[in-house]
Image (cartoon, rainbow, N blue to C red):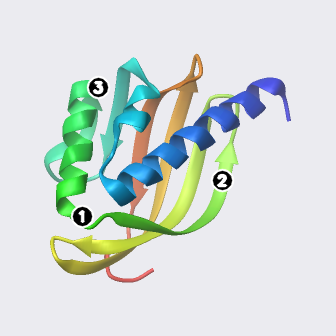
Amino acid sequence: MTTEVENTLKVAKQAFAHFTHGLATGEWQTFLDMTTDDFTFWFPMGKFHGLNQGKERAKEFFEYVSQAFENGLKLASLDSITSNEKTVIFEFRDEGNLLGKAYKNRVAVAFDVRDNKICSYREYFGSDGKSY
């Protein structure tokens, strides 16, 4: 593994730890502090469907996530991590209560790293939200 790949993986793993902490607690600032000023994110559905730009939009999105999962969303398992010089993909399972109903899902999130920060986030999921 090259030094660049190792550094990208290190930064992304730290960001993922802050990301899962945010999911569980609603405290997103440490994750947001790791994002670049021109941060973008892509989400597959709803109010934030498609490409979104900027930290303020990201803050709005993560606050929305915390409202939807009022008691937090817990990481059930981290199934795989794939990385290269720029991107790290985390595949995981999560569970919680979505708007008061039991929720389980398989998710993949991709973090792009630039200058030791996360410059882009993309989320992909596809289960029915109730089972793995």
Q: Nearer the viewer, residue 8 or 72?
A: 72
**To which residue does mark 2 refer?**
81
- Residue 93 vs 132, above or below: the answer is above
Please name the residue shown 42% across and 67% down the image: 74
User: Can residue 4 be seen at all in this image of the molecule?
Assistant: yes
Q: Secondary structure at mark 2?
A: strand
Please name the residue shown 47% across and 28% down the image: 34
Q: Which of the two labelled residues, at mark 2 and mark 3, occupies the earlier sequence position?
A: 3
* Disc ID at residue 55: 3
**To which residue does mark 1 refer?**
69
Which label sits in the foreground, 2 or 1? 1
Residue 80 image offset from top left, x and y in percent: 65, 60
Residue type, label 1: Phe
Q: How many neighbours does mark 2 have within 10 angstroms: few (below 14), some (14-19), or many (20 or more)?
A: some
Q: Which of the two labelled residues, at mark 2 and mark 1, occupies the earlier sequence position?
A: 1
User: Can residue 49 be seen at all in this image of the molecule?
Assistant: no
